[in-house]
Amino acid sequence: MRYGLLDRDDLPSMLGSLTKEQLDELCGEIRQFLLDHVSQTGGHLASNLGVVELTIALHRCFDTSRDRLLFDVGHQCYTHKILTGRKDAFGQLRQFGGISGFLKPSESIHDACITGHASSSISVAQGMAHARTLLGEDYSVVAVIGDGALSGGMAYEALNSAGASKEPLIVVLNDNNMSIDKNVGAMSRHLQHLRVQPEYIRMKQDVKQVLDRSRVGERAANWISRSKRAVKSMVLQCSMFEQMGFTYLGPVDGHDVLAICDLLQIAKDMKKPVLIHVKTKKGKGYSYAEQQPNKYHGVSKFNIATGQPLKKAVTNFSTEFGKELVRLAKTNPKICAITAAMPSGTGLGTFSQLYPQRFFDVGIAEEHAVAMTAGMAKQGLRPVCALYSTFLQRAYDQLIHDVAIDHVPIVLGIDRAGIVGEDGATHNGVFDVGFLRQIPGMTLLAPSSYAELRGMLRSAVQHTDGPIALRYPRGGEGAYTEDHWQGQAAVCLREGTDVALVSYGIMINEALQAAELLEAHGVSTAVYKINILTAAFSDEFLRQVSQCGRVAVIEDVMHAGGVGQALAETLALQQIQMNWIRLFHTDSSFAPQGAVRQIYEYYHLDGNAVAKTCLEAIQHEKEETGRSSI
């Protein structure tokens, strides 16, 4: 499809010469391009539709091959990618081997840093600004952060530090009153009250330039400054950002390219910390996304005309988790639910509607969520905190300091555990097993089916012996739909004498498939499923595994700290002789983006690869035995 201005070869250098009418035309073309492509690949839609004008303004005012432009989280960077030479790659957006849905410096010099998690952009930007000054270089540093990301505490640590440093830095606050679900908290209310007109800022700059030319002017400027502060304190609500050391500009219409450019240029000339408040509409230009921005934040393939997904939505571990928690809450008034800006993503939407007094969305603040959960549990409630695995990483200190040391009985629902697919390295939940198994007193459960998820959650809310967590994947259950929980640390799903396959969670499906393939080649294969990942291996379990003489552990996490490493270590320490041990995991690298099945194949975690590796090991063993007998 041809797009006119968007197809020109001189993007983004030609942006500065476009008229207002041409800029409006280009914005329309980009929105159509986004709809045409995201509807075919899936991705972040509403957030990108909302920042088209803002991104064009940024590229009109800055050279991102030199100037450093950081998009917080990065799920609003598609227009930036289009303008920096990656338009033709959008057919492979978020696909295996294609371009990332987030900023990725290995992709382009225009991407200043890796992104994927919220609230870190201002910290990184301040570091870049300090480096620029210390190295005597000359470029601008701009961080674009949404009001949702501004609910994260790290953003305020950075604002406080950056404002005090007086280092030239521009922070663009993209205020659409949304993160993924609707924003919550005092910060959201504060932004609704900030009103400083751009014309006032421009006039102040012009007057200052005139007065600076004379000594009389200098005295007058000092008097005006004192008078201004007095008047402002009477008639304007003081901006928190100004108290932190930033000059506040705005709010400005985030869908007026030239108006945004005016403020960007003013901020650039100030040579100090400046925050520009930009008001945008999430989902702008696509009626379905404007009406339901949370639904169209992250989308799968969909029909543009109807807004409906091409594949019918089915139940998944998140929704089953939410349903069971609602059932439990009906009979237990002490059960509460906590999440960090992800009520719909963690399956807690219905809970929030039925029990609003017992539901707490703390915004993008995982550290606070876990610590608050600990406080609730300490005082007798049964709080259940549901977070994505990749975001739980941020609360590691709270898990140790506020939870584990005092043996506080909180319940964690760890969503999106393991490989998540198209969002790539920043979102895969491959670290939780390693870091949770290190925490004394932590109990970590791994359901492999919806039935086991329900049973384990019922057990968890009754558990009072320290913290307990359930880790479950993104998406639905596989061929395994049975229930082998009943409080057992490990169970044998099928018996065998030649090879023992050990796995847990959703990966049990790959183990069972591998067992079928091995049996077809005459290899008697046992399959053991681990339910409690933090439990010590029992003598009986070790005896059963060792009888096979060969063991393979399959898990979709990093090697270090995993169950496979722990089993190999235990067998070695107890001097249990094995013919061989094979560990299947995500290696020690960051997993690439792509469909989950593709990532399994990439790491040889799929049933076919496991069976093939085991057969090769058995064949090699036979060859070695034959040579040694000659």
Image (cartoon, helix red, strand yellow):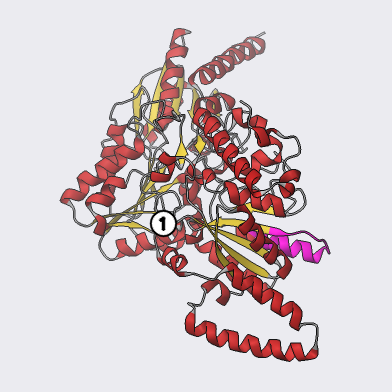
Q: Pick whichever, 158 or 302, lies toward us.
A: 302
Quarter that holds the N terminus: top right
Residue 246 visible at all: no
Q: Is residue 147 left or right of residue 334?
A: right
Q: Using the image, determine if residue 169 lies above or below residue 38.
A: below
Please state the horizontal and vertical placement of residue 390, each as a whole percent of the image: 50, 46
Tell me the chief SS of the magenta region.
helix
Q: Picture coordinates of residue 46 (x, y %)?
A: 48, 43
Who is closer to the viewer here, 332 or 240?
Answer: 240
Residue at (18, 53) in percent of width and height: 332
Question: Which picture quadrant has residue 359?
Answer: bottom left
Q: Residues within 10 Å of mark 1 (few under 14, many from 20)?
A: many
**Span highlighted in magenta in the image:** 124-141
Quadrant including the C terminus: top right
Q: Dot 1 corresponds to which residue?
A: 183
In the rendered view, does 558 fall on the left or right side of 131?
left
Residue 622 at what x, y percent from top left?
59, 12
Q: Looking at this view, is 157 or 379 the one in front?
A: 157
Task: Classify mark 1: helix, strand or loop.
Answer: loop
Q: Is residue 30 above or below residue 144?
A: above
The residue that appears at 80% across and 83% down in the rendered structure is: 213
| Number of marks in picture | 1
